[in-house]
Amino acid sequence: MNTQLQSDSAIELLSKIENKTACVGVVGMGYVGLPLAVAVFEAGYNVLGFDVDPKKIACLNNGTPYLKHLGDDFSKEISVSDQFRATCDPTDLQQADIISLCVPTPLGKHNDPDLSFVLESTKAVARVLRKGQLVVLESTTYPGTTRDEMLPILESSGLKHGVDFFLAYSPEREDPGRKTESTQSIPKLVGGLDTTSGKLAHAFYSKVVTDAHLVSSAEVAESAKLLENIYRAVNIALVNEMKVILEKLDVDIWEVVEAAATKPFGFQAFYPGPGLGGHCIPIDPFYLTWKAKEVGMPTRFIELAGEVNQKMPGIVVDRVASSLNDDKKSLCGASVLVVGVAYKPNVDDIRETPAVFIIEDLIERGANVEYHDPHVPVFPKMRGHDVNISSIPLDKDSVRNYDAVLIVTDHSIINWDTIALHASLVIDTRNALANCNEIRARLVKA
């Protein structure tokens, strides 16, 4: 491969990658960056973890875990190893031969891309950029971000891309809480801004994951990540809309999906819920719609799916109100217990969780709201939201005291029989009570 590389910097970096003497810097020690840093560490590289949050850095250097789904063992291992160091000082990134950016890409107030974290991180890298470094963006974004937004900032250092430094895109595919796959086992897409950058990035990730797949450009990799997430968002919107229709026809959407799933080809099961959550699925489709508008292309299908999914929390609250009305009660003044506030089962991740919109709507309509979630003992601060409540214990005596119990997230650790047997009214958005042997509560699926 060395004969195919055009610069001494590339040849030297490739040698470091193959010999595992390269130092790898990971920017962002969150749900994406930390698992990547651990995988790189376990592959045998020296790792420099960077984050602007000093609390995370202290936890990493002290061996204190802060992402529950990753477990405790790795925290203790990296804290005593000379191969892993965490820092808040961006100048330390000059020591890294490879720098991976794993920072948030949220939406602005008008559903437009907010690249501020990517751009600020890139500027920090540009200030310490040196010859022989490979920079890789992992954050989900629209096609062209790596080339059009990052490259000019990095080249403002005076170094030349493809000769002095190298730039690639490799989208993260983390799924917090999933037990069947790990960072190492999930196939990794890699696309460079030029042939050399692509080959170097592919060589690196091939040492970290079992299947690194090189594509022709960064734009292909950026677009592939968007397609993955838009595919999921659109199909969830379809089944959510069908759920609302079938409710009016008194047909159980959950049984319908299971019935359709008996077909061994041409159908993939997606399930309804109270709305989309997580950092990817609710946000990423709008990155493409924004970029499409730049080139004068409509994205009616994607936007419609977004509208359907965004309406779901409100539809759920309407269902709570109508169910209480059936019991001759008003939502205003009613006591409502929300069960599960994480965006998905068995994690503590509340990013873009539909629970926050549901809780805010319930409170705005006059309900007295409490929640139970063993994974989220205190509702953390969220940008644009103001929910200051803590999880309450769940037992048969407390459940009896609520006018309604609303199931938003179906954690496996929750005792669903307690709710099924002792609640008076249950609104179940996840079919969580399906496996209960006996249900004494009035059950409403929503």
Image (cartoon, rainbow, N blue to C red):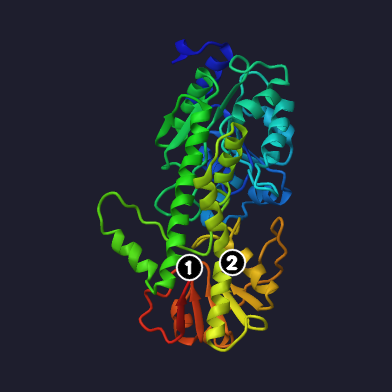
Cα distance, mark 2 to mark 1?
Answer: 19 Å
Q: Residues within 10 Å of mark 2 (few under 14, many from 20)?
A: some
Seen at 67% across and 75% down, the residue is: 365
Q: Can you say whether 355 is above or below 177 in the image?
A: below
Q: Can you say whether 59 is above or below 204 in the image?
A: below
- The one nearer the camera, 433 or 122, is 433
Name which residue type carries label 2.
Gly
Q: Can you say whether 237 is above or below 415 in the image?
A: above
The answer to whether any part of residue 9 appears in the image is yes
Seen at 60% across and 59% down, the residue is: 350
| Element at label 1 | loop
- The one nearer the camera, 254 or 14, is 254
- The one nearer the camera, 389 or 430, is 430
The picture places residue 148, in percent across and down from the top left corner, at 64, 26
Seen at 51% across and 18% down, the residue is: 196
| Element at label 2 | helix
Q: The N terminus lies in which quarter of the figure?
A: top left
Name which residue type carries label 1.
Asp
Q: Residues within 10 Å of mark 1 (few under 14, many from 20)?
A: many
The disc at residue 410 is: 1
> Where is mark 2, residue-wise?
314
Q: Can you say whether 295 is above or below 336 in the image?
A: above
**Which of the two marks, 2 or 1, is nearer to us in this view?**
2
Seen at 46% across and 43% down, the residue is: 228
The picture places residue 396, in percent across and down from the top left corner, at 52, 86
The picture places residue 265, in percent across and down from the top left corner, at 26, 50
Instruction: Tell whether 295 sits left or right of 179.
Output: right
